[in-house]
Amino acid sequence: NAGVMQNPRHLVRRRGQEARLRCSPMKGHSHVYWYRQLPEEGLKFMVYLQKENIIDESGMPKERFSAEFPKEGPSILRIQQVVRGDSAAYFCASSRAKRDTGELFFGEGSRLTVL
Amino acid sequence: GESVGLHLPTLSVQEGDNSIINCAYSNSASDYFIWYKQESGKGPQFIIDIRSNMDKRQGQRVTVLLNKTVKHLSLQIAATQPGDSAVYFCAENIGSGGSNYKLTFGKGTLLTVNP
C-alpha cells in the first residue's frame, strides 16, 4: 500500500519561472493538505483540499500560489514567478476524512530551490 | 508569533539512555497535540498524540506528558536507539469543529543518539 507520493522530490527553478508540485494521496484518502517547511523551521499549513474543492486556504500566500485537486489525478501546488524566498520543502499529507482522530500521513516532500 | 516552541534545539544522548524532549505552547485553546519524527530528507512521521483531556499517553517506547497548567508537552523515549536520531516536532491543533488538519508545528529538536 503506497504512501503519499510526491514529485518531483527536488526541483530547481530560476527567479520568475513557475514551479508545479504534485501529490498523490494514499489509496482511499480523499483529503489533501499542503504544508511548507522553511530551512530549520517547523511545517506551516498552507491549504486543505478535497476533490475539486478548496476547503481552507488560509495559509496560502495571497499571490502567485494556487492549489487544486481535480477529480482525476494528483493534487497540484503551483507557484508562479518564483522568488528566492519560495525555496523550501513542500509537504503533502492526506487523510481518509476530516475526522476527529486527526492522523495525517505525510509524503517525503518536494524540495524547491530558486536560484 | 509561534504558538508552539521548544526549549532545546539539540539533544545528544547515549544509546540505551532515556530521552526527554520538551515543548511549550501558548494557545490555551489548543486541544490536540502530536509528536512527529522527521529523519533527514524525509517527511514527518507520526509518533504519538494526546488530547487535552488527558495528561499522559503511552506508546511503544514513547510517552507523552501534557501539563495544561503550564502549557507544556514532553516526549519521553525509553532506551533510545541510533534509529531514533532525527528531528522531533511537537504540533498543536488550531482547527475547529474537531478537525485536526491545521497543525502548528514548533521548530523542532534534533536528537542525536551516540552509540
Image (cartoon, rainbow, N blue to C red):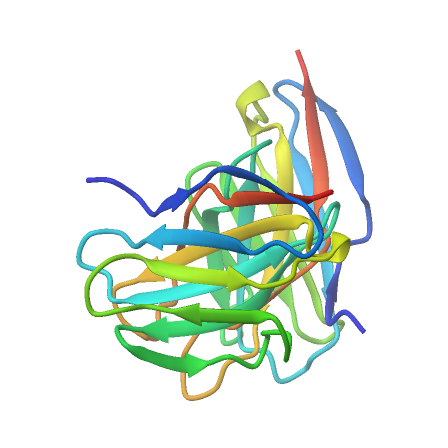
Q: Is residue B22 visible?
A: yes
- Of residue B33 and residue A69, the one placed in the foreground of this image is A69
- Of residue A24 and residue B73, the one placed in the foreground of this image is A24
- Of residue A113 and residue B114, the one placed in the foreground of this image is A113
- Tell me residue B44's x, y (percent): 51, 46
Query: B112 above or below A98?
Result: above
Query: A80 above or below A19?
Result: below
Q: Quadrant of the C terminus of chain B?
A: top right
> What's the residue at 75%, 56% (across, down)?
A85
Horizontally, is A30 left or right of B10 in the view?
A: left
Query: B81 above or below B73?
Result: above
Residue ranking furthest to the front? A16
> What's the residue at 68%, 82% (across, down)?
B28
Q: Residue B31 falls in which quadrant of the image? A: bottom right
> What's the residue at 62%, 28% (across, down)?
B85
Q: How many marks?
A: 0
Horizontally, is A49 left or right of A85 in the view?
A: left
- Tell me residue A111's x, y (percent): 58, 42
- Tell me residue B1's x, y (percent): 81, 74
Horizontally, is B71 left or right of B89 in the view?
A: right
- Tell me residue A71's x, y (percent): 20, 69
Query: A5 above or below B61?
Result: below
> What's the residue at 30%, 43% (across, down)?
A3
- Of residue A60 and residue B75, the one placed in the foreground of this image is A60
Q: Is residue A104 visible?
A: no
Residue ranking furthest to the bottom? B97
